[in-house]
Image: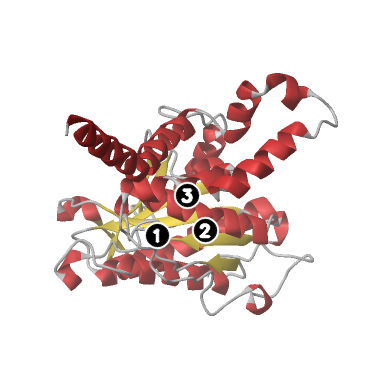
């Protein structure tokens, strides 16, 4: 009788381990991924092999590992396979594959001097919206911040800036929003290595009305805040390049439309800005701004961005501000 009980417990333990092991391994892999890159992991585990020239063992082991685990042995592969399952169990990815507004490269603005600046625009927190219009701070799917990003994109196109825009939903699982939007950023850079800047459009938190708006040309518009990530939490050796770009934009905004830009704020996260030296997070208005105020701000801020981009890209041939 006692032997049968021990056998039953053993079976339960083995079966339970089989179910729990993937979660434990996934969580552990997520922690390891946060500390080291895949290259560092492979290099530390197989130093003699990884440093050898022409040896097949490292390639064989990576291929075998991929075949057995179903995980691509790259950072992107680890992220796709591990973190979403650990942080958001049971959450299915929203089926919205959009790299693109109606305008694509072939429909982009006329080129000047053989080319024109190209920028990428997307929303990490796709569900953000404006409470006076929608009655809530966030919606499921696409909030009005996505429409504001579209207005910014159209303003840039009117200034002959080419735009690659994504409306893909990244915050179906809020905890992995930046991991999801990083995939979109990488796709954009892969599709267009010449991309000059990347803008992640958000809206700010709740602020007093006197701080959230500015009067420009007799009209109340939302204010715009530029957020730059730093190396406070994770390695980001080039973050000051992003900061310098943000400061150039803020300075020109103050010159062109005084009061529109609320300045540049440096925060501790990286916000995917380590992927490109001209990647910025731009908060257009806040929760308590109206959509109309945010839309007006986006249209004005497009002029600011276009001037800076043409200044860097085309020098003397940049179009004048309207």
> Residue at image x 51%, y 75%?
101
Q: Residue 236: where, in percent of width, then height?
A: 52, 31
CB contact under 8 Å: marks 1 and 2: yes
Q: Residue furthest top?
A: 48
Specify few, some or many for label 1: CA neighbours under 10 Å numbering under 14, 14-19, or 20 or more.
many
Q: Residue furthest front?
A: 1
> Residue at image x 68%, y 36%?
61
Could you give the CA–CA distance between mark 1 and mark 2, rounded to whole angstroms? 9 Å
- Does residue 194 appear to the left or right of 54 in the view shown? left
Q: Residue 110: where, in percent of width, then height?
A: 69, 75
Q: Residue 157: where, in percent of width, then height?
A: 56, 72
Circle 2 residue: 184
Q: Number of labelled discs? A: 3
Decide if residue 137 is in sight here. yes
Sooner in the amino-acid sequence: mark 1 or mark 2:
1
| 182 relative to 219, above or below | above
Circle 3 residue: 81
Could you give the CA–CA distance between mark 2 and mark 3, rounded to whole angstroms? 16 Å
Q: Residue 121: where, in percent of width, then height?
A: 50, 61
Decide if residue 249 is in sight here. no
């Amino acid at each position: 009788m006692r032997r049968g009980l021990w056998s039953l417990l053993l079976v339960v333990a083995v079966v339970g381990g089989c179910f729990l092991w993937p979660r434990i391994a996934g969580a552990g892999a997520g922690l390891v991924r946060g500390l080291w890159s895949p290259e560092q992991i492979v290099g530390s585990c197989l130093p003699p092999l990884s440093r050898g020239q022409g040896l097949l063992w490292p390639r064989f082991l990576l291929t075998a590992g991929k075949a057995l685990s179903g995980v691509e042995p790259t950072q992107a592969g680890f992220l796709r396979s591990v973190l979403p399952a650990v942080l958001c169990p049971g959450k299915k990815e929203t089926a919205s594959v959009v790299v693109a507004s109606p305008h694509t490269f072939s429909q982009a603005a006329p080129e000047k001097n053989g080319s024109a600046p190209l920028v990428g625009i997307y929303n990490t927190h796709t569900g953000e919206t404006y409470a006076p219009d929608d009655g809530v701070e966030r919606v499921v799917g696409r909030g009005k911040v996505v429409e504001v990003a579209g207005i910014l994109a159209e303003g840039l196109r009117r200034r002959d800036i080419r735009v690659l825009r994504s409306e893909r939903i990244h915050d179906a699982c809020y905890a992995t929003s930046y991991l999801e939007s990083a995939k979109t950023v990488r796709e954009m850079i892969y599709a267009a290595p010449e991309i000059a800047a990347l803008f992640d459009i958000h809206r700010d938190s709740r602020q007093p009305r006197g701080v959230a708006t500015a009067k420009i040309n007799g009209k109340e518009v939302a204010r715009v805040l530029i957020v730059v990530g730093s190396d406070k939490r994770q390695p980001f050796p080039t973050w000051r390049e992003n900061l310098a770009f943000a400061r150039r934009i803020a300075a020109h905004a103050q010159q062109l439309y005084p009061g529109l830009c609320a300045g540049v704020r440096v925060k501790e996260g990286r916000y995917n800005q380590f992927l490109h030296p001209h990647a910025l997070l731009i908060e257009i208005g806040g929760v308590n701004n109206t959509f109309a105020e945010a839309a007006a701000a986006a249209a004005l801020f497009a002029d600011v961005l276009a001037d800076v981009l043409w200044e860097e890209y085309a020098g003397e041939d940049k179009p004048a501000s309207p």
